[in-house]
Amino acid sequence: MLKVQHFTSNFTSHIPGITWKAKVHDKMNSNIPLNLVYNNAQRPKQTSRKFTPVSTETAPDYWDWVQMNPGCSDFVPDIGNCGASAQVSVMNTFSDFRCFQGKDSERTEYSPQYVLNCDPNNYCQEDKLSKQVWKFVLDFGTVPSSCVAYTSWLTGKISKCPTTCDDGYAKLPTLVKAQGIQLICYNYLDNEALIKKALINGPVSTMVWVYEDLQYYESGIYQHVYGNTVGGWSACEFVGYGEENGVKYWKVKNVWGREWGENGYFRILRGNDDLGEAYIESDCYQAIV
């Protein structure tokens, strides 16, 4: 991992054409990567509303679910001490999408802990690909986090598949499944238009290849400029797109808490190459609920 003592928050200001700012985050030190920091800040409850899909023939130039429907989408997770980005991010995306489609009377957070505990061969130290988690939700389902809370953020461990809620008495509710999963991104194709069209109907689950410099992202439109990979893939969620000063970007919800990035989100170059900056346009899915 990149050592903090060798990193200065203004290093990006010396790179010609750079479109983002870096920061040494307060809770980061030379021994703890940022994605092991847990931020349990609670967001005030906001009113959600069912979204009526618009025509997808032509995607608009700008889209931002966080601004358009914060009651459904502005909930930023944090993986804490468990490297289960796929389980945490996919469940957050699933919760967002069900909210958009009016499947729950109010936004319900679905449990990544249940998926971790009940999907065989899960380990906090070994992340899965998003498509593997989606398959579990499609085949088996999960329960609300109010029944089985995400505790691995603190312990870094998983438990046995539960037969009751956390109180030890209440029976597990009926498992909630995805009705289908749509593959949105196709490797080595121009996925930009496909992702934009999909986003009009709701958030899109994706993954980003994590380089050292992404951990230090503070604001702006990220592009990889420094360092090697840190742990490989990390799951995240497309929530919008736009353009700033002629630079196209995706807006993405991360799983590192609100103290990181732009209140827990980051913007990243859009349509930069065949696979997108840090491969973010190469492996993404959308739920059918």
Image (cartoon, rainbow, N blue to C red):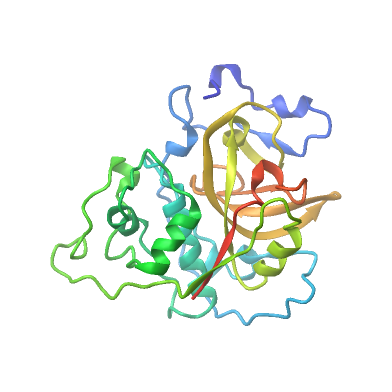
Furthest residue to the top?
6
Furthest residue to the right?
246
Query: Do we see residue 130 in this rendering?
Result: yes
Q: Position of residue 246 (x, y in %)?
A: 86, 50
- Count the labels in the image: 0
Q: Position of residue 43 (x, y in %)?
A: 46, 59
Above or below residue 18? Residue 187 is below
> Observer-nearest residue: 7 or 127?
127
Q: Position of residue 284 (x, y in %)?
A: 59, 57
Above or below residue 58? Residue 168 is above
Q: Quadrant of residue 285?
A: bottom right
Query: Do we see residue 24 in this rendering?
Result: no
Say which residue appears at 69% left-offset and 35% top-offset: 224
Say which residue appears at 21% left-offset and 53% top-offset: 160
Say which residue appears at 52% left-offset and 25% top-offset: 1
> Observer-nearest residue: 77 or 119?
119
Q: Quadrant of residue 143?
A: bottom left
Q: Position of residue 10 (x, y in %)?
A: 69, 26
Q: Is residue 205 shown left or right of residue 79?
A: right
Say which residue appears at 37% left-offset and 42% top-offset: 82
Q: Is residue 166 shown left or right of residue 266?
A: left
Q: Quadrant of residue 277?
A: top right
Furthest residue to the left?
169
